[in-house]
Amino acid sequence: MNISYKTLLEKMEIEIKKAREANGEQELKGHLYAVKALAELALEGEDSRGYSPQKSIPPEKVQTISIPRQERVKMDDGANGDSLFDF
């Protein structure tokens, strides 16, 4: 995002006017913090000129592992049922 200094200064002037017209200390501080944020944004813009965003790293591919279905082994040993207690 490239914001011109002129735009930032205009926004700062608006906030300063609102600060002068403020009715309470809290309202005044709110406008002063807005001016501070705009000033920091202007100064930070100088530092970020050499900034280049990092390339995004593609997500790793997720492999689905299929487990073959195992069927029960049938034993014909003369048992009466599936339970261990069936004789």
Image (spheres, rainbow, N blue to C red):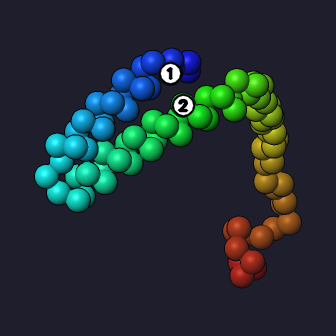
Disc 2 secondary structure class: helix
Q: Position of residue 71 (x, y in %)?
A: 79, 48
Q: Nearer the viewer, residue 85 or 55?
A: 55
Query: Quick check: can you spot residue 53?
Result: no
Q: Return the residue found at the far left.
A: 23
Task: Give whichever of discs 1 and 2 has the lower sequence position.
Answer: 1
Q: Position of residue 46 (x, y in %)?
A: 66, 28
Residue 53 vs residue 3: left or right? Answer: right
Q: Which mark is residue 42?
A: 2
Q: Which mark is residue 37?
A: none
| Residue at (70, 73) in percent of width and height | 83
| Residue at (72, 82) in percent of width and height | 85
Q: Which mark is residue 5?
A: 1
> Does 29 sit above or below residue 42?
below
Q: Amino acid at mark 2?
A: Ala
Residue 57 vs residue 34: left or right? Answer: right
Q: Count all numbered tags in the image, as a single digit.
A: 2
> Does 67 sit above or below residue 61?
below
Q: Amino acid at mark 1?
A: Tyr
**C-beta proximity under 8 Å, tags 1 and 2:** yes
Residue 43 vs residue 61: left or right? Answer: left
Q: Position of residue 43 (x, y in %)?
A: 59, 34
User: Looking at the rendering, in which quadrant would you find the N terminus?
Assistant: top right
Q: Position of residue 6 (x, y in %)?
A: 45, 18
| Residue at (44, 26) in percent of width and height | 8
